[in-house]
Amino acid sequence: MRGPGRSAAALLLVAAYGLGASRGSAQALPEGFLLDAPGLRVLAPADLAAQPPRFPFPVGERLEYAVSWFGVPAGAVVIEVARFVEAEGARYAHVVATIRTNKLFSAVYEVDDRSEAWIDLDRFVTVRTRAVEKHGPKLYDETVHFDAATHFLHARLDKLHKRQRRDLVFDFGPFAYDTSDLVYLLRALPLAEGYAVGVPTYANHKVFEFRIEVGAPKIVSSKAFGTQLALAVRPSTRLDGKLYAGGEGVVWVSGPARVPVRLDGWIRTAQSSFLVQGLRAVLTRYVASAPGWTPVREPVVEPITAIPPTQDGVPHWDPPPAVRAARAASGVAPHDTTQSLPTEILPR
């Protein structure tokens, strides 16, 4: 569920997470946004004046990428801050990422993904996600909710092609980022040559250390920005303190808004033994903000870096009394179960 390969892809092929199900089954998709809630209110710039958010990226910021594989055009990625919303007493950035192969690649192996996330504007952490994905003949629909009171993550993954549902409750420990917020967190860090940091990140029912190391800048070209100096950001992941996925992937970041203008190298899929090499994603279009919203300038956020000891990605920690009380009141315990899908939601 939301594997670290999708987090590397979520970084530029994002997201995310690292880093969902299919748009190939029309019955599986509701109209409009995948994430919604009763009583939801869409926020305007004036609604944020009294309490500016910690999340520094504005509504309407949109990044569009052309993806190639060993130089052959393969598809497109779009990452966008679609809106700010208020729901259930909290404020969220509603971000949307889509990944689609072109007609040529789709004839061999079609990828058609849409993932959405609510990132808490004040805590800068993902709270809810939903992803719908088509990978060849495989169709998925996944929802994830991070419960801040119990520190349990609730996930439901429908494998429509297998007529199977997986329900997971996972103890994510004291704190965990999600693949959905990594692309924004990376851009909000005080990036400079020599900077390095590792942050706890949930992916694929494990907590990893997602690590970035910043190398020397060089001149990089993109259709959106032309030719300019960009920093080399090298991502990797560690599991239980050991290198899990590291290598030749480089994200080139440029400008005051720290926009990823190019990704070179490889991504690792959720199946840790499978590498996709020869990838390049180049920024073709950048929209700084929607009308009325102020474009981001020099965001700086200090990340949460404390990662408790883990065994096979499961944190070992002593929850404080408030968390233990919330867990007892919820009556929920960690579990991982699989069952057949209800007939009414099966694709036709």
Image: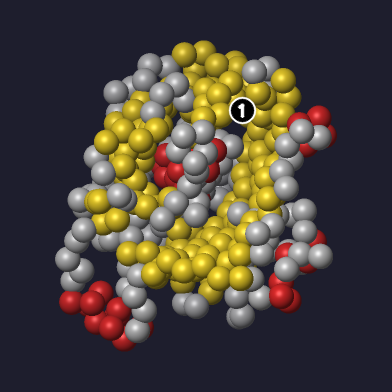
**In the image, residue 113 lies at what x, y percent?**
67, 48
What residue is drawn where x is 49% and y is 65%?
155
Residue 273 vs 294, above or below: the answer is above
Q: Quadrant of residue 79?
A: top right
> Can see residue 291?
no
Q: What residue type is labelled 1?
A: Ala
Residue 298 vs 59, above or below: the answer is above
Q: Residue furthest top?
A: 219
Closer to us: 162 or 308: 162
What residue is drawn where x is 45% and y is 58%?
126
Closer to us: 193 or 17: 17
Closer to us: 190 or 147: 147
**In the image, residue 132 lies at what x, y percent?**
65, 56
**In the image, residue 5 lies at what x, y percent?**
49, 40
**Residue 102 as seen in the image, left or right of residue 61:** right
**In the image, residue 11 lies at what x, y percent?**
51, 38
Q: In which quarter of the image is the C terminus?
A: bottom right
Colouring convention used in this rendered image of the protein: secondary structure
**Residue 230 as seen in the image, left or right of residue 301:** right
Q: In which quarter of the image is residue 314?
A: bottom left
Residue under pointer 1: 281
Callout count: 1
What residue is drawn where x is 52% and y is 22%?
265
**Residue 34 as seen in the image, left or right of residue 118:** right
Residue 300 vs 24, above or below: the answer is above
Q: Is mark 1 on a helix, strand or loop?
A: strand
> Can see residue 239?
yes
What residue is drawn where x is 30% and y is 29%?
195
